[in-house]
Image (cartoon, rainbow, N blue to C red):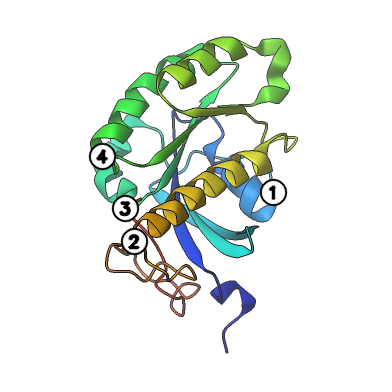
Amino acid sequence: MGTKDDEYDYLFKVVLIGDSGVGKSNLLSRFTRNEFNLESKSTIGVEFATRSIQVDGKTIKAQIWDTAGQERYRAITSAYYRGAVGALLVYDIAKHLTYENVERWLKELRDHADNNIVIMLVGNKSDLRHLRAVPTDEAKAFAEKNNLSFIETSALDSTNVETAFQNILTEIYRIVSQKQIRQGSGEQDDLKTDNTKPIHIAPTEDDTRKKSTCCANL
């Protein structure tokens, strides 16, 4: 028997990128499990977690991928980005170097991901306001210049974590649904159209009975 989690209208793959130690894994665990681990160690390789939200009466299942930010794992990039329709580009507001490296991460994203991927710049660890090294206005200006959405979050105290994921998933959904309308699909209940490509991932026990409703090209 399938569970309620097996039922969704859209499946969107979203990737977390940014330097090691900026809090990507804790953003993932806070959003998907409402957990935070102060002793969190650097991610080795790749992991992902899922959570479903409601947008306009539709069930959107987010499959959120997290990878190590260290240079030695760069070989996994092409497979990591494949099929992603959204990306959270994360830096630490208390470490200016992680913000300086955002430009390099953005270039890597542009090189490997789909041209239409939705990108959000995320200044994490906003609870460390007394140690702030990156002015909010500076990051906001960079985001506007590069056509990114922007938000500051704290995985520690939950500030804006829910909002960040809700906003990017809603934006992806709006783009996908508008594209369907433009194409005159008429089948708005899922993404089973000739113009969509499935996200290819290794099946897990959790994902073996799902509908193929993912969309890789917005």
Task: Give 128 or 178, whichever is nearer the viewer.
Answer: 178
Query: Helix or strand or loop: what does disc 4 sit on?
Result: helix
- Which residue does the image show at 54% across and 48% down from the upper left? 169
Which residue is identified by label 1? 35
Which residue is identified by label 4? 112
Which residue is identified by label 3? 217
Q: Give the distance between the C-alpha atoms of the residues marked 4 and 2, in whole angstroms.
A: 15 Å
Position of residue 112 in the picture relative to residue 66 (left or right) = left
Question: Looking at the picture, which amino acid does disc 4 mark?
Answer: His
C-beta proximity under 8 Å, tags 3 and 1: no
Q: Residues within 10 Å of mark 2 (few under 14, many from 20)?
A: some
Question: Looking at the picture, which amino acid does disc 2 mark?
Answer: Ile
Task: Give 3 or 211, whichever is nearer the viewer.
Answer: 211
Q: Residues within 10 Å of mark 1 (few under 14, many from 20)?
A: some
Q: Give the distance between the C-alpha atoms of the residues marked 3 and 4, in whole angstroms.
A: 14 Å
Q: Quadrant of the N terminus?
A: bottom right
Q: Give the distance between the C-alpha atoms of the residues marked 2 and 1, in whole angstroms.
A: 27 Å
Residue 172 location (% of width, % of height) = 47, 48
Q: Residues within 10 Å of mark 3 (few under 14, many from 20)?
A: some
Say whether disc 2 or disc 1 marks the residue closer to the N-terminus: 1
Residue 178 location (% of width, % of height) = 44, 52
Which residue is identified by label 2? 199
Q: Residues within 10 Å of mark 4 (few under 14, many from 20)?
A: some
Label 3 vs label 2, nearer the camera: 3
C-beta proximity under 8 Å, tags 4 and 2: no
